[in-house]
Image (tube, rainbow, N blue to C red):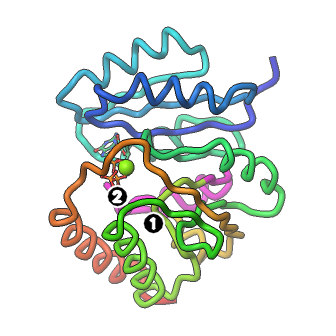
Amino acid sequence: MTSPSLTIVIPVHNEADFLTHAIERLADALDGLEFVLYLVENGSTDDTGAEAEALSERFPWLEVLRLPAADYGAALRAGFRQADTDWMVAFDIDYFSRAFVDDVLERSDQADIILASKRDPEADDRRGLLRRLGTRVFNLLLRGLFGSEVTDTHGMKAINRKVLDDVMPNVKSTEDLFDTELVLRAERAGYRIAEVPAVVEEIRPARSSYLKRVPRTLIGLLKLRRLLGKK
Ligand SMILES: Nc1nc2c(ncn2[C@@H]2O[C@H](COP(=O)(O)OP(=O)(O)OP(=O)(O)O)[C@@H](O)[C@H]2O)c(=O)[nH]1
Ligand SMILES: [Mg+2]
C-alpha cells in the first residue's frame, strides 16, 4: 500500500447528534481518495467520543484522538502533530468539500498554504447576513491590525508539513484563533499562500452565540496584535 497523500483533521466537540451522519457524508464525498482522517475530540459532555470510536471501527481510514479540555485550537494542533503526510487539511464537521481537496491536490506544487476564502470574488457564501458580516469585519481587522493580505483564516485550509514544523511551535493562541495565528505567522515568514473561492453551505444551522464570541475574538485579536505587531 502506498502512503496516504494527505491527512484530514476535524476537531469535534459535542457532536453526538450529528457526527455519524456527517462522516457518512464525508465518506461518500471523498470516495476514491487516499487519506487518513483524525477526529480530534476534546471536552465533550455528550457521547461524541464513543461515537467517534465506533466510527473508527467502521472506516479503516478514520482515527480518533481524545484530549481532556475543550479547545478547538489544541485539537487542530494535536491532529497536525500526529500526521505524517506532506499535506494536512483542516475541516469542520459541518463544513467540508471534495472540491476543496481536489483544489489542494492540484495546487500543492504552487503553494505552502491553501485557504478556502469566503471573501474571494468568486466565493459563494450562503450563510446568513450576520455570519457574512462577521467574516467581513474579521477580514478588515486582519488587514488593519496585522497588515495581512490574507482574506480568510476561518475555514477550510490545507497546510504543508514544512510550514507546520517551522511555524506551529511558535503559535501561542488557542481556541478559535489558533489557525489565524498560524496563517499570519506563515505569511510573515514568507510562505506562499494561495486562496481558492469557498462555497459555504453549512450542513446544519449555526449553533454558536455571536454575543459570546465577538468579545472573546476581539480580545484574542488584540493580544495577538501585541504579540506579532503590524507587518
Ligand atoms: N475538539 C474540539 N472541537 C471543537 C470545539 N469547539 C468547536 N469544535 C468543532 O469545530 C468545528 C466548528 O464548530 P462549530 O460549532 O460549527 O463553529 P462555527 O462553524 O464557528 O460556528 P457556527 O456558525 O455556529 O457553525 C466543529 O467540527 C466542532 O465540533 C472544541 O472545543 N474542541
Ligand atoms: Mg459551523
Which amino acid, by three-letter code, is at mark 2? Asp
Q: Is residue 109 left or right of residue 217?
A: right
Work out whether residue 223 or residue 126 is closer to the camera in this orientation and state it.
Answer: 126
> Outermost residue toward the top?
57
Label 1: which residue?
Answer: 180
* In magenta stretch: residue 74: no
Amino acid, disc 1: Thr
Disc 2 on helix, strand or loop?
Answer: helix
Per the image, label 1 sits on a secondary structure element best described as: helix
Vertical arrangement, residue 170 with respect to residue 86, above or below:
below
What residue is rendered at 65% in x and 70% in y?
Answer: 122
Which residues make up the magenta segment? 158-182
Cα distance between the residues tagged 2 and 1: 8 Å
**Picture quarter containing residue 46?**
top left
The question of residue 170 being in magenta is answered with yes
Is the distance from the Cβ of mark 2 to the nearest ligand 1 atom less than 8 Å? yes
